[in-house]
Image (cartoon, helix red, strand yellow):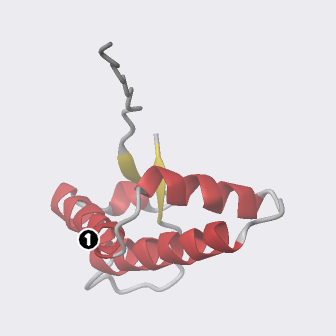
Amino acid sequence: MKLQIEQSYVEATLKIIGDHAHLAAADEISTGIAEALNVFSEHHVDPLVCAAASGKLEKNELLSREEALLCVIWDMADDKAFRAVTLGWLFRAIDIRLSFG
């Protein structure tokens, strides 16, 4: 008897959003997303799983310990992306963050 296992993967695009995202150049956005992906890779986690945990946190839902840690990783990736995108910008009140779309 042969067992066949199928997996399907959801395609999602990591992007930079926010009121000031339109001010970022394409290379700044690429650098920011690369920095975020490095964080996910370093921690061996799926960015979609981190985003889902972060979404639960935003809705004030109860999190497991693992989900709480995934939220911390999402925040670290978001911070790295933000810093990479806005490097050299002269103003500080900037609304730019990671999202999937």
Q: Residue at x 33, y 77 (%)?
A: 86
Q: Residue at x 21, y 59 (%)?
A: 30
> Is 26 situated left or right of 77 in this image?
left
Q: Residue at x 52, y 75 (%)?
A: 75
Number of disc labels: 1
Q: Residue at x 41, y 56 (%)?
A: 46
> Is 10 situated left or right of 35 in this image?
right
Splitting the image into 4 quarters, where does residue 27 fall? bottom left
> Is 51 situated left or right of 16 in this image?
right
Splitting the image into 4 quarters, where does residue 87 fall? bottom left
Q: Is residue 65 visible?
A: yes
| Residue reaching furthest to the front | 1
Residue 101 higher or lower than 84, as above or below: above
Splitting the image into 4 quarters, where does residue 11 fall? top left
Please provide percent x and percent y for residue 42: 29, 75
> Is 90 situated left or right of 26 in this image?
right
Please provide percent x and percent y for residue 99: 48, 53
Please provide percent x and percent y for residue 53: 63, 59
Q: Secondary structure at mark 1?
A: helix
Residue 75 higher or lower than 61, as above or below: below
Residue corresponding to mark 1 = 38
Please provide percent x and percent y for residue 91: 43, 84
Residue 37 higher or lower than 48, as above or below: below
Q: Is residue 18 visible?
A: no
Mark 1 surroundings within 10 Å by alpha-carbon count, few (fewer than 14), some (14 through 19), many (20 or more):
some
| Residue reaching furthest to the top | 1
Asked whether 31 or 95 is in front, the reply is 31
Q: Quadrant of the N terminus?
A: top left
The amino acid type, in three-letter code, at marker 1 is Asn
